Amino acid sequence: MTDLPYARPIQVSRPPKIPPYSFSLIAAVCALVWLSARPSFAADRPTLAGVWNAAPLTERWNIGDWGKACGPRPAAHEQPGGQVTVREENGELVMTGLGRTFRTNECWEPLPGVTRATHAAADHSWKTRCTSAPNDPRQTTLNTTITATDTTISLDETGEYQFRIEGQNCTASTRRTRNFLLFQRQGQVPPSTVTAPPPGVQPQATAVGSAMPRLVLSTSTNCCG
């Protein structure tokens, strides 16, 4: 009987077995590295504290049922823009300017009897919900959202108003928006006020000092009479 090479059993080498606990160890190490890297990413972002230019506040109203007993119909009020100072405080932003101080853990429109119900803050994002008391006949719900990049801040607030007076329903809704643009970040050097000369014009040299005046003595012989 011929001994054929292909008829012999082939020895197959098997990779060594990895203990099950090794996978858990690798996963734990990866999670630790990811968590330790997160604060460094946040630390790399520049501060939002500084001076910001606020655009005018835009307000739009949608009136539902609104009888005479409801009083004057809501209307948009012009709120001009200007400069505000922003500082960071315990993960929130505090804006001072335009006649008021606003914090990102509250709603933009201050109304009596309307208090904060929920608040959530994430990376450069703040959401606040304010409502009136359940037994208040004037039911109000405000939802305020603030989002920010390194150079812009956006305000977006919606409001729902429902109440009943003398048998008449009074319902209305509104939306307010405002954008802020960074003017000067805290700790940043203000831009230089020195302007460059127009193209093709050579700047003139500035004299550092002036020469001493030359004293000329008279040679006249009649000085003494």
Image: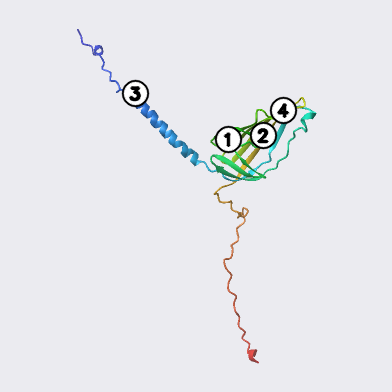
Which class describes the residues within 10 Å of circle 2: few (<14), some (14-19), or many (20+)? Answer: few
Residue 141's x, y, as percent? Answer: 66, 30
Q: Are marks 3 and 1 in contact (CB under 8 Å)?
A: no
Dot 2 or dot 1, earlier in sequence? 2
Residue 189's x, y, as percent? Answer: 56, 51
Q: Are marks 2 and 1 in contact (CB under 8 Å)?
A: no
Which of the two marks, 4 or 2, is nearer to us in this view? 2
* Residue matched to label 1: 126
Q: Nearer the viewer, residue 167 or 63?
A: 167
Residue 111's x, y, as percent? Answer: 68, 36
- Mark carried by residue 113: 2
- Mark carried by residue 20: 3
Display coloring: rainbow
- Mark carried by residue 1: none
Quote the CA–CA distance across marks 4 and 1: 29 Å
Quote the CA–CA distance across marks 2 and 3: 60 Å
Quarter-of-image position of residue 81: top right
Does residue 86 lie above or below 135 as drawn? below
Amino acid type, label 3: Pro
Q: Quadrant of the C terminus?
A: bottom right
Residue at 49% across, 41% down:
44
| Residue 87 appearing in the image | yes
Amino acid type, label 1: Trp
Quote the CA–CA distance across marks 3 and 4: 64 Å
* Residue matched to label 4: 163
Amino acid type, label 4: Phe
Residue lying furthest left: 1
Does residue 155 lie above or below 225 as drawn? above
Quarter-of-image position of residue 193: bottom right
Q: Nearer the viewer, residue 190 or 154?
A: 154
